[in-house]
């Protein structure tokens, strides 16, 4: 971690390494992801008007975003409040969002997959799918029991499910 860095989003001032107290005193929010900074981060040593996580300072200036495939988005410092087109939560002047100025499209860095969202969502979907398959197999077991009791009444249904599961 360098003692001081520069950031295109806060031009002309250098940012210096700062230890943020977390809950003690007033919480400082990262200009890029708008999450509270606890521990190490960077603060503008000249005006105090810019705070950021070290990881957020390495966000790319231009990205391709699946929610707006027509144009690349540019990381920009807001000069007025704007709505995020992904989560519909407003951000205020001094925060940074990815923008397509031509289309008036704005999205938070945290609403893209650049920070951590994509991996977490992927894992959750995987678990839901496995649970769904387990439930289907349980249902199939129930049908087999019913099939034995009724003497073959449920058989066509079982065949359909077995085909779907590739048993
Ligand atoms: Zn951040
Ligand atoms: Zn400054
Ligand atoms: Zn958002
Ligand atoms: Zn656009």
Image (cartoon, rainbow, N blue to C red):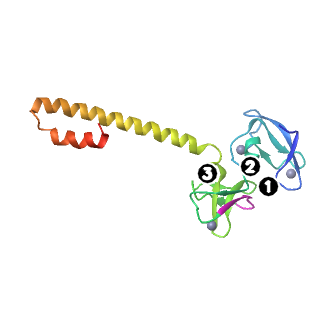
Question: Dot 2: what SS?
Answer: loop
Rounded to the nearest angstrom, the CA distance separating label 2 from label 1 is: 9 Å
Callout 1: 10 Å neighbours few (<14), some, many (20+)? some
Rounded to the nearest angstrom, the CA distance separating label 2 from label 3 is: 16 Å
Question: Dot 3: what SS?
Answer: loop
Q: Does the beta carbon of the residue at mark 2 sit less than 8 Å from ligand 1?
A: yes
**Disc 3 to disc 1: CB gap under 8 Å:** no
Magenta region includes residue 42: no
Indicate the position of residue 83 as horizontal and vertical percent values.
Answer: 62, 59
Q: For the point 35% across and 37% down, which residue is it? A: 133
Extent of the magenta region: 72-80
Nearer to me, 140 or 75: 140
Helix, strand or loop: magenta stretch = strand
Q: Does the beta carbon of the residue at mark 3 sit less than 8 Å from ligand 3?
A: no
Q: Name, please, the residue furthest toward the left.
A: 151
Q: For the point 81% across and 55% down, which residue is it? A: 8
Numbered badge on residue 9: 1
Q: For the point 22% across and 31% down, which residue is it? A: 142
Q: Is residue 101 above or below residue 146?
A: below
Callout 2: 10 Å neighbours few (<14), some, many (20+)? many
Choose top left, top right, bottom left or bottom right for residue 148: top left
Nearer to me, 27 or 137: 137
Indicate the position of residue 86 as horizontal and vertical percent values.
Answer: 57, 56
Q: Earlier in the sequence, mark 3 or mark 1?
A: 1
Question: For ligand 4, which image quadrant applies?
Answer: bottom right
**Disc 2 to disc 1: CB gap under 8 Å:** yes
Reading the image, the residue beneath label 3 is 112
Q: Quadrant of the N terminus?
A: top right
Reading the image, the residue beneath label 2 is 31
Q: Quadrant of the C terminus?
A: top left
Number of numbered discs present? 3
Q: Is residue 101 left or right of residue 164?
A: right
């Amino acid at each position: 971690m360098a003692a001081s860095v520069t950031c295109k989003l806060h031009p002309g001032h250098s940012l210096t390494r700062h230890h943020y107290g977390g809950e003690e005193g007033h919480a400082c929010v990262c200009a890029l992801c708008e999450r509270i900074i606890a521990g190490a981060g960077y603060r503008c040593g000249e005006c105090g008007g810019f705070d950021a996580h070290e990881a957020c300072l390495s966000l790319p200036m231009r990205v391709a975003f699946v929610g707006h495939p027509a144009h690349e988005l540019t990381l920009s410092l807001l000069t007025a409040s704007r709505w995020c087109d992904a989560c519909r939560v407003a951000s205020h002047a001094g925060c940074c969002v990815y923008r397509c100025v031509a289309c008036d499209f704005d999205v938070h860095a945290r609403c893209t997959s650049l920070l951590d969202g994509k991996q977490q969502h992927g894992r959750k979907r995987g678990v839901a799918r496995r649970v769904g398959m387990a439930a289907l197999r349980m249902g199939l077991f129930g049908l087999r029991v019913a099939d034995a009791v009724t003497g073959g009444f449920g058989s066509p249904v079982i065949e359909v499910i077995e085909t779907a599961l590739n048993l």
